[in-house]
Image (cartoon, grey):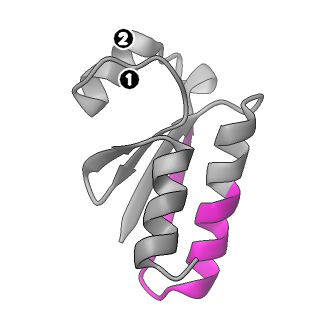
């Protein structure tokens, strides 16, 4: 399972998403993630909208196995329901 998290370092939900992904990586064989700092990469809302194929108002934007799932709340709910987090 591969997760990509688009976020920024001064965003509390981005920090939470990164912490959850780190926890899951330690719990689940084959789980990995990449954190992309949108500020460092020069990405804006329009760039993220193209990546997730919908309008973007907030970060993080999280992609699970190539499918956009939303932000931290959705990632957390998915992890609890499906990954035993």
Residue placed at 25% from the left, 23% from the top?
Answer: 54
Residue behind mark 2: 46
- Is 41 on the left or on the right of 17, as rendered? left
Q: Which residue is mark 1?
A: 48
Is the residue 10 above or below the residue 1 in the image? above
- Which residue is painted at 53% across and 16% down in the image? 42
Q: Which mark is residue 27?
A: none
- Position of residue 60 in the picture relative to residue 49 (left or right): right
Does residue 19 sit above or below 67 in this rendering? Answer: below
> Quick check: is 9 in the magenta stretch?
no
Q: Quadrant of the C terminus?
A: bottom right
Position of residue 41 relative to residue 46, above or below, is: below
Q: Which residue is at 72% across, 31% downward?
A: 11
Q: Nearer the viewer, residue 50 or 70?
A: 70
The location of residue 66, given as percent across then percent down, is 25, 52
Q: Nearer the viewer, residue 63 or 35?
A: 63
Q: Which residues are magenta?
A: 19-36
Mark 2 burial class by Cα count in 10 Å: few <14, some 14-19, many 20+: few
Percent across and percent down for residue 56 are 40, 20
Instruction: State the SS at label 1.
Output: helix
Between the C-alphas of marks 2 and 1, the distance is 5 Å
User: Do the numbered discs 2 and 1 sit on residues whose CB atoms are within 8 Å?
Assistant: yes
């Amino acid at each position: 399972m591969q997760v990509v998290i688009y976020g920024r370092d001064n965003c509390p939900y981005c920090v939470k998403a990164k912490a959850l992904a780190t926890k899951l990586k330690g719990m689940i064989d084959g789980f990995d993630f990449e954190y992309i700092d949108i500020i460092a990469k020069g990405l804006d809302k329009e760039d993220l909208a193209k990546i997730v194929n919908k309008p973007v108002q907030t970060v993080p934007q999280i992609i699970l196995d190539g499918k956009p799932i939303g932000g931290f709340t959705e990632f957390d709910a998915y992890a609890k329901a499906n990954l035993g987090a």
